[in-house]
Image: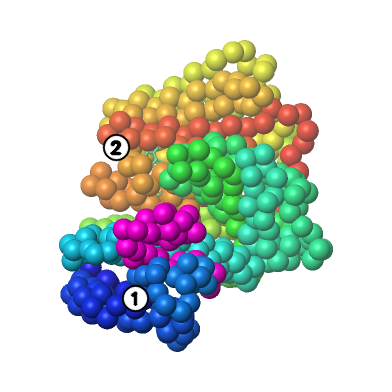
Amino acid sequence: MENKDAQIPVLVVDDEEDIREACTRILTRMGCKVSAAPTGNDALSLMEEEPFSIVLLDLKMPGLDGMEVLRIIQERNKNVLIIVITGYATVETAIEAMKQGAYDFIPKPFEPAQLRIVVGRALEKQRLQAEAELSESLRQRTLLDLGKEKSRIRTIIEALPNGVVVLNAQGKAVLLNPAFRLLAGLPPETGPGGPISAYLQDEGVLSLATRIYSGEFPAGTDIPPYEFALPGERFLMVRGRPVLGPEGSCLGAVLVLTDVTSLKVLDRLKDEFVAKVSHELRSPLATIHEQLAMVMADTVSQVPEKDQNVLSRVKEKTQGLISLIGDLLDLSRIESGAIAQKPSEVKLDELLSAIVDFMGAQAKAKGQSLSLAIQGEGARFRIMADPMVLESIFGNLVTNAINYTQQGGEITVSLSLDGGEIKVAVADNGFGMERKHLDRIFEKFYRVKTEQTRHITGTGLGLSIVKGLVESLKGRISVGSAPGKGSVFTVWLPLSQEKNAAGKKLSQK
Ligand code: ADP
């Protein structure tokens, strides 16, 4: 405070030397930087050389009249606070001076305390004014910074290699960057303003975008990415998030597009490689397996039991390898679309009934009950699909239910209609799984290892095959599960009469 006031320059203008000296002494002690002038002219020329914040001005001086000096100072700088010094006889002049814009007045003769009070008030006013100016300039700065920040963010979005499009709550694009235009194959002059369908035509993208901007996903929801194909063997991945307002309301959506064509090509090369290696391994392995079986049969009486056990384990392992290779080949055929489906009209209730009968023996061996529950009449469950594909889907699910359920457990297959779709649920009261595994069990080779499942052999490919097949029939699959309670795998298949394209390429994961 002291320091701030110390910087305030004050000018005392009075023809009486005593007054000038007294004022200088008192004001210097108050921390002001004081200058003094005996006449109006001296004062004006001093003011031309340096700035003053406060001027103490005697109105009655020889030479240039005090009122005239006041007018000139006012004219030059409105911010200078002028305190007029005046004798009793000239109170009216003082009032006139105040009307002219003087800040305050002090009658002559005055006590030091009076001077301190009047100047103190002026100093306070100057300080407040300086503070107001400072905060105004800070406000201006912040606005300027904000403006700069906005344009900086815009520049960054423009330069991003990923396509970005921002939609408002009505689904209209409010911002799109050049990478978005490029990836979506739009002309460079394409601007925002249209609905998302004006820029991207894939149905999956449109439904994802609509669900996001209409606020279907609450804050923090993990929205899975979606992949789709564009003409010319190009693959894009889109990730979307809602744009949330301060109170969590949904203001729109932001979609980010990434070109994943090279990853897809790599994936395909990897799949081709796996398919090739599997194919090459299959015949020699089958030969080893057969010959081992022959050797074992021929020598059963001559080989000691210990060695027979070793041979049995070798046979088990080769059998495991053969089924792994079988699964890999199935999977690569499904993924490449090479699997030729022969759709025919299938009565799903009869097909499931046959599976349940066939697998009943396996369940019985574990003391489990395996039953089929059909809601509605059988005639309604006819669909066009390759029966081998349906057998593979539900056979796999029932086998898993038997494998991952304890002795004496219960397995139920239920069949019903759900809107325009057929719904098949395979439920068990077995080991179940923790939530964190549920999104991943459809990935290739993903297996859940727990104390109960450690000894169960498997390849981790069954559910990838099931998912691939379900999707090839334009259906979908989901899982619900809880550890110790059991699991339910639900498959929805379209009831439509149209034939599902055989060997359709799967462009989506
Ligand atoms: P595999 O059975 O050969 O391991 P899958 O792809 O069929 O491969 O299954 C992947 C994993 O999902 C299994 O290893 C198992 O941990 C889990 N799983 C599948 N079905 C069930 C089920 N009905 N109950 C509990 N866990 C299951």
Q: Quadrant of ligand 1?
A: top left
| The disc label shown at residue 483, or none | 2
Could you classify mark 2 by the number of other residues whose Cα lies within 10 Å: few (under 14), some (14-19), or many (20 or more)?
few
Circle 1 — which element? Answer: loop
Residue 370, by quadrant, is top left
**Any part of residue 133 in sight:** yes
Circle 2 — which element? Answer: loop
**Image coordinates for residue 145, horizontal then vertical, percent:** 50, 67
**Residue receiving disc 1:** 14
Residue that protrudes farthest toward the top in the picture:
377
Residue that protrudes farthest toward the front in the picture:
89
Disc 1 residue type?
Answer: Asp
**Image coordinates for residue 235, horizontal then vertical, percent:** 67, 61
Disc 2 residue type?
Answer: Pro
78 magenta-colored: yes
Task: Tell me if 446 is positioned left or right of 170 in this view.
Answer: left
First reached walking from the N terminus: tag 1 or tag 2: 1
Residue 246 position (above or below residue 498)? below
Magenta range: 75-103
Q: Of circles 1 and 2, which is in front?
A: 1
